[in-house]
Amino acid sequence: MTTTTPVEEDGVTRRDFLYVAAGGLGAVGAAAAIWPFISQMNPSADVLALSSTEVDLEGIEIGSEITTVWQGKPVFVRHRTEGEIEKADDVVVADLPDPEPDADRVIKPEWLIMVGICTHLGCVPLKEQGDYSGWFCPCHGSHYDTSGRIRKGPAPKNLVIPPYEFLDDTNIKIG
């Protein structure tokens, strides 16, 4: 009786090669089958379109503001007066419920860009009202100053500053 020995080269048999090749081919096949399910979880084109918005600042006069929409939320874009900027700078930051200097909330002092949603329960505050000449949320009485910082009332945080950048002197991109 004759016995055959497997063909080996450095301790690796043909069977070992077949196992590795079949496993690799199976992994590639599984990845190709799963990819459509993973890909469908990406945001759709309409959602990506809302991820940023551009605003032309040229028509906003000093002392006025506009409301634009970013990600379905109102965003206040205010062209502040010198008096509003001075009021915001003169505040003792340590006395605030959510301490944040005005300089950390703006890129250019004359432009204040913030999400117009009260941090208490999500209402939209009214502009140029309240005890600090900023914004007032009539639902529960939160008062915000000329920098959008909470000064009085139940709101726990300042109005949120969205990510934004100046594209040039008269245009900003929010998001």
Image (cartoon, helix red, strand yellow):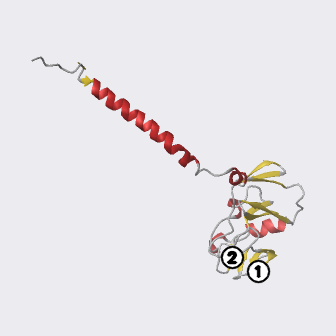
Q: Up-down: is 173 above or below 72? A: above
Q: Residue furthest front?
A: 1
Residue type beneath disc 2: Arg
Q: Residue 22: x, y in percent? A: 37, 32
Q: Residue 146: x, y in percent?
A: 77, 70
2 and 1 marks in contact (CB < 8 Å):
yes
> Circle 2 is placed at which residue position?
151
Q: Residue at x 37, y 29 (%)?
A: 21
Disc 1 crowd rating (10 Å Cα; few below 14, some 14-19, many 20+) is some
Quadrant of residue 10 within the rendered picture: top left
Of 20 and 4, nearer the camera is 4
**Mark sitting on residue 131:** 1
Task: Name above or below for residue 121 compared with residue 19.
Answer: below
| Viewer-nearest residue: 137 or 153 | 137
Considering only vertical position in the picture, is 49 above or below 146?
above
The residues tagged by marks 2 and 1 sit, at their Cα atoms, a distance apart of 9 Å
Precedes in sequence: disc 2 or disc 1: 1
